[in-house]
Image (cartoon, rainbow, N blue to C red):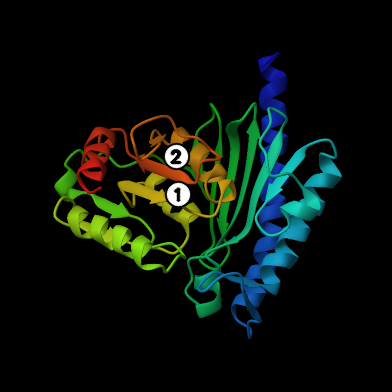
Amino acid sequence: MGDNNHDADALAEFLAVAVDAAKSAGEIIRKGFYQTKHVEHKGQVDLVTETDKACEELIFNHLKKYYPSHKFIGEETSAVFGTDELTDEPTWIIDPVDGTTNFVHGFPFVCVSIGLAIGKVPTVGVVYNPIIGELFTGVLGQGSFLNGAPIKVSSQNELIKALLVTEVGTKRDKATVDATTNRINKLLFKVRSLRMGGSLALNLCGIACGRLDLCYEIGFGGPWDVAAGAVIIHEAGGLVFDPSGGDFDLMSRRIAASNGHLKDALIQVLRESE
């Protein structure tokens, strides 16, 4: 990657610009959170609000001002603003509001997620929950932080004492729901308990800071849910991989994550729960 000092400076600037964008979007989310919501349905249970659109526009415009040559992948308006495919070019991957259903219900697990991939590798990550006031950041090779303090994954090495987080997703056809609930039924005998926070980006940050031990999700919205969280977990000493045990693919809509001890155990129980 060329001259390391220059890289460190460049990465520090990418992070600072992303944090500014996340905080500005966070203000919009915080104001909207306490007001009447205007909700549209993308699918049966998949929601989008005016706030999603306003935040995405703000973030894209902020980043484009600084980095006009970079590529962009975003949840709401990829078609207008950006691209659907990931190249080696520096690419900002953005979820303006992760946890829209939580937002609509006034449940305070809502965040902005901004990731930067360089050479297809998640390199800078910012996840900001403006309701609770938690800013998670990570930069490849430089560690992960919560509100400026270093974070690391849990040291739990017994599956039966582990807290697992997943989501049920937005599809409600019988086959999907049965597969999801059957898997959960089996997993409940293997772990201490299960959480569903309603935001995959925040679930991943929960792994990074040791609140949660294990995470998996199959069939989520897209790379914008995981681009930032993947860096933040990696830099906190955690592992991100495909639920099958293979390598994590940012574009696959499949992710699993764990602390440094429980990866093999998670892969094993996921296999047994198929």
Labels 2 and 1 touching (C-beta < 8 A): yes
Whether residue 42 is situated above or below residue 129 in the rendered picture? below
Answer left or right for 81 relative to 249: right
- Compared to residue 90, the image places residue 76 above or below, namely below
Q: Left or right: 20 with respect to 179?
A: right
Of residue 24 and residue 83, the one placed in the foreground of this image is 83
Q: Is residue 61 above or below residue 262?
A: below
Q: Residue furthest top?
A: 2
Element marked by disc 2: helix
Crowd class of label 2 (few under 14; some 14 to 19; many from 20; radius 10 Å): many
Numbered disc 1: secondary structure: helix
Would residue 148 be visible to someone looking at this image?
Answer: no
The image shows residue 249 at horizontal and vertical percentages of: 50, 35
Q: Residue at x 41, y 50 (%)?
A: 218
Q: Do we see residue 206 in this rendering?
A: yes
Q: Which mark is residue 205?
A: 1
* x 60%, y 76%: residue: 33
Q: Quadrant of residue 128?
A: bottom right
Q: Does residue 112 appear to the left or right of 238 in the view shown? A: right
Query: x, y (%) of residue 24?
Result: 72, 60
Tell me residue 66's x, y (percent): 83, 42
94 or 234: nearer the viewer: 94
Residue 186 placement (x, y as % from top left): 18, 55
Q: Quadrant of residue 31?
A: bottom right
Judging by the rendered image, the residue that carries numbered circle 2 is 233
Q: Quadrant of the N terminus?
A: top right
Three-letter code, disc 2: Ile
Where 51 falls versus 186 (above or below)?
below
Please count the marks in the image. Answer: 2
Q: How many neighbours does mark 1 have within 10 angstroms: few (below 14), some (14-19), or many (20 or more)?
A: many
